[in-house]
Amino acid sequence: MGHTLAEKILGTRSGGAPVEAGDVVVARVDFAMVHDARAANALKAVATLGFDALPNAARTAFVLDHFSPPPSREAANVHADMREFCERTGAVIYDVGDGICHQVLPEHGHFTAGDLVVGTDTHSTTYGAFNAYGTGHEGTDVAAILATGRTWFKVPESIRVELTGRLSPGVWAKDVTLAMLGRLGAEGANFKVIEYTGNAVSEMAIDDRMTLSNHAAELGAEAAILECDDKTVAWLAAHGAAAPRPVTADADARYADRFTIDASALSPKVAHNHDIGDVVDVSELAGQPVHVGLIGTCTNGRLDDIRQAAAILKGRRIAKGVRLVVTPASRAIYLAAMREGLFEILTEAGASVDAAGCGTCVGITHKLMSADRERVISSANRNFKGRLGNPESEILIASSATVAASALTGRVTDPREFAFDIRNAA
């Protein structure tokens, strides 16, 4: 019997012998990450465990992205503790404004194809876009990884999803995951690894692939791993990563489930009713008024997302009374968007651009507050009640293109009404 991508990576990292779903292994971690919302627990655990040395500190990044900038004295003190710890131990640090953990780790070449990466955030599944096993653990687990370089896993089962065909103009990886959520429901892939394959995946740019892997967290996935191809290798090389060790699944691997989605048949999707698993075609909500738009976050704050918005809004103004906020996922993306003139287009259209970080997405920094009975349309990842700070407002989740189109018209709008596809613009 063959093996899945997850079984192969965890097997290689736990001694090299084949492993199967259900096995318990102690695996070597190639890189670890702690963000500021979990850093206090991690630092407390390090102090409590009393390690004499932290030999894996140099392979661990501390990222100041959630409380960015710190909205309270307590948050500022956590940041100060993180800076001191990294200075003392040699751990990597990314400060306020550098970007979101899931963007800065691959951007700075901290891992490569075939690696095992652990972060203190469920959206650590993002790293699977590069043929790595990326998964979320608590800060206390990373404390042990700092000292030992290892942690334990129960090997998950996998789901194989083949995306055939080609995404139509106006349809993006965001819509693929929303379709998956509509099919499986929120947490429908709990404690499973998703393998995405097929022509539609091969044709995706890296930005879209990162969205595909990232958003698997809402399905409850432990990881979401794509196969390595020339695009993967080129992107990793361009960002200074180590030589890739590509991993492929065996043809006779055993899966908990496998199915096919015809990507060419997908239309833009929207999640509503404060449930990321309650997904409908945009046409079902078309015309409903919107008051606030958010483009950004670790899920959809990449350069292609900003290009989508700029392509729709160029030479136009967002609807009267609508606020549109754009938060790039990293400083590097911010600078690239500036160089391309994208922020000039968005600002002239009436949008506001925020610094790179997570604070707006999770409502920590209170930079985007909607009023009672207002409707927000967001390219973020979650829409439970109060996610942005006000439980009396409604949150819709959609692609960056759908958000931009809706902000432009002031109502939920299919982005295909604006026939422009950045994939064909080069």
Image (tube, rainbow, N blue to C red):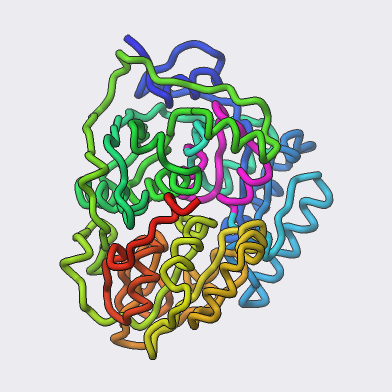
Q: Nearer the viewer, residue 155 or 266?
A: 266
Image location of residue 289, percent across then percent down:
26, 82
Q: Quadrant of residue 352?
A: bottom right
User: Does residue 370 appear in this view?
Assistant: no
In the image, is 102 to the left or to the right of 390?
Answer: right
Where are the magenta residues, as a range? Answer: 101-128
User: Is residue 115 located in the magenta-colored stretch of the structure?
Assistant: yes
Q: Quadrant of residue 169?
A: bottom left
Q: Residue furthest bottom?
A: 321
Q: Nearer the viewer, residue 51 or 232?
A: 232
Q: Residue at x 29, y 19 (%)?
A: 254
Q: Residue at x 64, y 59 (%)?
A: 336
Q: Residue at x 45, y 66 (%)?
A: 311
Q: Residue at x 58, y 30 (%)?
A: 233
157 vs 382: above or below: above
Q: Quadrant of residue 329?
A: bottom right
